Image (tube, helix red, strand yellow):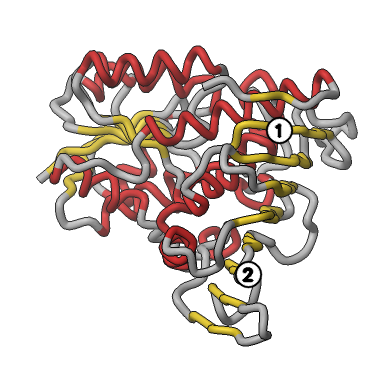
Amino acid sequence: MLKVGIIGCGKITQVRHAPEYAENPNVNLVGYYDEDPRRSRAMAEEFGGVAFNSAEELLSSGVDAVSVCVANVAHAEMTIKALNAGVHVLCEKPMAATMEECEDMLKAARISGKRLLIGQNQRLAKAHQKARELIINGEIGRVITFRTTFGHPGPEGWTGMKNSWFFDKKRAAFGTMADLGVHKTDLLHFLLDDEIDEVTAKIATLDKQFPDGSPITVDDNAYCIYQTKKGAVGTMHVSWTFYGEEDNSTIIYGTKGVIRCYHHPKYSLIVESPNGAKIYFQLDQLTSNKDQTSGGRTNTGVIDTFVSALISGEASYLDAEESIKAMRVIFAAEESAHKGSTIHISQ
């Protein structure tokens, strides 16, 4: 049985990591650390284990693996510290605050011989996995264009805090482009079995404010035009200002048809042919922030995938070697928005 700890006990730990570890029969949740001791004590009381006084104390307690669920700017430091201590790591997305930090995390994993996975849960959704299979098998021919969206009312609905660290550039490093955009960028790589190599982006703060009325210091909307190595062109829009139902849809347009993922309230996958025929798949529904904060379904599959990778030793969809490709696109999009020009991505 794997001995697992969690570093950072905010909302993502409370509604995803801790409950999913507790549900996994191959895991013994042994402890937690948070800069606010009240939060780590609350996790220990609810899920068992010990509230440690420091991350170092947790890492030296004999744990096999940890989840790193701290603020974005601390991802690299805490992940590298854990890897250097001989501990496997599941790090929340976005991977890190700079490209250099992302590379340093990979280097630490290689040197330590320990696994590093990133919580890119959209790769695990059943409709996305089926769509990837259909696309690779040529069901809709050559992919020409695509359109992907991820929008919800914002982190305040997720965290319950109007002054969330997600809004503070000093702790978050970036806003919706990396918070939601990294999910959809990574998903496009996965679905298309391709990589984005060109981006033109507009990143803006359109509405979100701190409680005192001043604008938040990160973006709340991001729009990107992407081109892949294989020549497909499409758009991504991510937003914290969808003040209604969450939209987490992706549409792929090919020479022989169209695939719609999570675009219909009942059918998670729809395949359309040029003659108008449609095939409907009722596979699953994506777990939304509202689902989890209201006590709904908790299991995203991320923890089970991490645990399985550690036990089997096999490659995983969530390996950092895959996730870092999406981070290159995120940083290129930030550069594009800043310069007002198209950026070609160097690998």
Q: Residue at x 68, y 61 (%)?
A: 247
Q: Position of residue 311 (x, y in %)?
A: 14, 44
Q: Earlier in the sequence, mark 1 or mark 2?
A: 1
Residue type at mark 1: give it: Val
Q: Is residue 221 above or below residue 19?
A: above
Is residue 38 visible to the viewer in this orientation of the structure? Answer: no
Residue of label 2: 258
Q: Residue at x 60, y 84 (%)?
A: 278
Residue 238 is marked as none
- Image: 87 above or below 187: above
Instruction: Classify 67 as above or below 340.
Output: below
Specify the quadrant of the image occupied by residue 199: top right
The image position of residue 304, as x and y in percent, is 28, 53
Quadrant in the rendering for residue 222: top right
Residue type highlighted by circle 2 = Val
Q: Is residue 250 left or right of residue 14?
A: right
> 35 or 279, which is in the foreground?
279
Relative depth, front residue between 100 and 190: 190
For disc 1, the marked residue is 199
> Dot 1, crowdedness within 10 Å: few (<14), some or many (≥20)?
many
Identify which residue, 67 or 214, lies in the foreground. 67
